[in-house]
Image: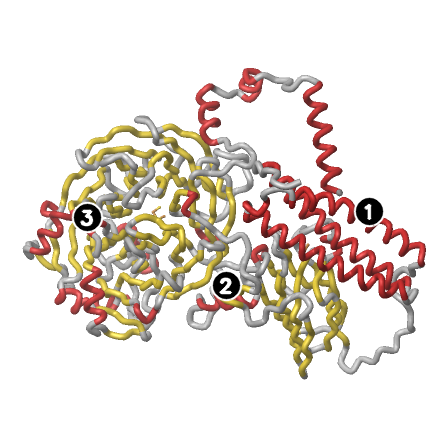
Amino acid sequence: MKSLFKASVALTALIGLGATAAYAETLQDVMKRRNLTEKDLMAAAKTYTPTGGRDEFLAFSSGGQSGQVIVYGVPSMRILKYIAVFTPEPWQGYGFDEESKAVLAQGRMNGKDINWGDTHHPAISETNGEPDGKFLFINDKNNPRIAVINLHDFETQQIVVNPVMASEHGGAFVTPNSEYVIEAAQYAAPLGGEYAPLSEFNEKYRGGVTYWKFNKEKGRIVPEESFTIELPPYSQDLSDAGKLVSDGWSFTNSFCAERYVGGIEKGRPPFEAGCSANDVDYLHIFNWKKAEAVFKAGKVKKINGHAVITLETAAAEGIVALVAEPKSPHGVDVSPDGKFIVVGGKLDTQASVYSFEKIKAAIDAKNFSGKDPYGLPIIALKDALHKQVPLGLGPLHSQFDSKNCIVYTSLYVDSQVAKWDYCEGKVLDKISVHYNIGHLVAMEGESVKPKGKYLIALNKLAIDRFNPVGPLHPQNHQLIDISGDKMEMLYDLPIPLGEPHYVTAISADKIQPLVRYKYGTDSRTGEAHKMAVRPGAEKIVKEPGKVTVFATAIRSHFTPEIVEVEEGDEVTFHITNSERAQDEVHGFAISGQDINLSLEPGKTATAKIKAEKAGVYPYYCTEFCSALHLEMQGYLLVKPKGYKDTAATGKEGQVYTKADFDKQYKTNIETQAVIDAVVKYITSTNFKDFPTVVALVEDATDQLKFAGEAKQKADDAAAKQDWQQATLWAGQWWQYQVKAADIGLRVKTYLEEHGAKVVAK
Ligand code: K7E
Ligand code: CUA
């Protein structure tokens, strides 16, 4: 009824608007007032998404130091979600419920909680070289870890710590069928975390690349089936997996092949000087299929229980080869057909395009120019290179277009994007972006079938770009139209959460998330929660020193509402959201206990506290879930040890009479008439053709069942002339009616908007 009222107010307003001038200003007026050009209008038209509109692509952005993932739509550039990954996030209950604490605990290092991550590279799971929208992986550079996010609910379900590296960077990159998630080290250190003096850098410090085996059915990385290839202490950087003709291979570049160790405090030149002294670094070429066979044959050394293929074995088995790269490379990207590998260079002006065919021929013919100090064969640059193309200052990362041979490369120093032809080796167009661009992303631009259309420049340091918000500025993601010959700037999106390095984008129709969980799901594992209860089965179990509450949440109450414990008790709430309607999420917070749960429909989550101090602790729902959301509350009463109730007897609250009961009863009968009318309308349509509606109708049916039960209790109490109980239960009966009516009206609107047909009288 409330919604009916709102709708009629809106309607009146709309009619009123029609009666006066529909638009006070013309488009020209607005352009003048806001100083907009026609080009601006065109850009706006290309990104503006009217209310209710959907995006064609979804972008998953690293959240940088926030340890999260940012999801936004393209081309609207509207932020849709922050996915909590390495960092607690209270809205999602992440790090506040016991289930997600267990996920975060997987990421502990040396017994320490690590409550942040320096996320760099997200990657979507792939099938036949195309992103399939099932899982998302992201790495943590500082604390070498990889997280697995299930895209059926956008929740982090696994964190694996690299058992041998001290830092990493070249992750997460996946092989074409997600067989492996690749993670390459960054700063060399003794594998496994042992101490070694820097004077033994050449002998004891090492790099590496880890191949994490991924089980697609289970959606989990399998550490026992994963292995690392030990590498020289060159700082490995980015990686990419081969595809199609180069499937079975992977590529990782490196910097500081000089193996220089700084030491300003000892009067030595800093790292930056010694690490860029030579003219070349190395592109590492891996035959991971061969490495996998060597691992399966057991030719490994165990470090911290993890299988490592030693440098010696790698060299002997021909698993790794090196190719010279221009000084201080960054970025390595394999072309959609798998034939070329594009490498940038922070201190270079040209991008290098390597030919996989040539590399393969050199390896097959053992055509090497020499060996590095660790016995790894080196392929001469001329024997591997397809072309070097001058692009501008500081080429970094590359992304591919849907058009053949077209690639886009970020130019860090120039703050530009170059569009060029890597087959022919010529520059086609350049666009200036706001400084300084790091990565860039094209739609499915790293897959075997890039989608083109849009490119996003991922810029750091957004000075002078947005309204100032203090010395720490947001970063700037700039949307560029790449559908024509010339690139066109469309839109700036400030990113106010860490320094995102990389973004991966996928066609939105490949992402098909759940709208609700199967009843009683532990979302952090995806499995049935053992502590879930159905409505009616709620209970409080008391053991010495321990109280366990099996609760449900539904609009607009928790069951139970009052929980009494004793000082010192360990109190555990297992709460199941028993809603079936989409988006009827509840929260659960207890005063002063560092608890907030997010309970989406069907989910079961656990809050655990120690009732250290006697007192009264209100708990409530933290999501505005219904008109009576504020009343969705309860009390945790922590009694002093040995407390005896000697309080004066009295009644809490108001006293009700027969008149109160009769008044409520009359309201309820009238409400029922409205509900009956809505039900009549719904059942006259083909509502069963709409799954969303079917779920809502089930939910409304539940509410009406509860209403009937409450009515029975009211009637029983009235028969005993207990007007107190009778009036309260009549009130509860009305609450259920209101919820049923509210859902009914949602259904009616949905059916009308989706063109339902009347099929019965
Ligand atoms: Cu910032 Cu990929 Cu970590 Cu380049 S990386 S920018
Ligand atoms: Cu449930 Cu507010």
- Name which residue type carries label 2: Arg
Q: Is mark 2 within 8 Å of ligand 2?
A: no
The percent coordinates of residue 217 (x first, y second) are: 38, 62
**Kind of residue at disc 3:** Glu
Give the left or right position of residue 645, taking residue 197 as reference: right
Look at the numbered disc 3 and give the secondary structure of its residue.
Answer: strand
- The image shows residue 593, relative to residue 139, as above or below, that is below
Q: What residue does disc 1 label?
A: 670
Residue name at image x 6 percent, y 54 percent: 367
Question: From where the camera sits, is residue 408 visible?
Answer: no
Under 8 Å from ligand 1: the CB of mark 3? no
Front position in the image: 416 or 502: 502
The residues bearing labels 1 and 3 have C-alpha atoms spaced at a distance of: 80 Å
x, y percent for residue 703: 70, 56
Amino acid tagged 1? Glu
Q: Nearer the viewer, residue 633 or 170?
A: 633
Q: Earlier in the sequence, mark 1 or mark 3?
A: 3
Q: Which residue is mark 2?
A: 524
> Which residue is labeled 3 in the image?
325
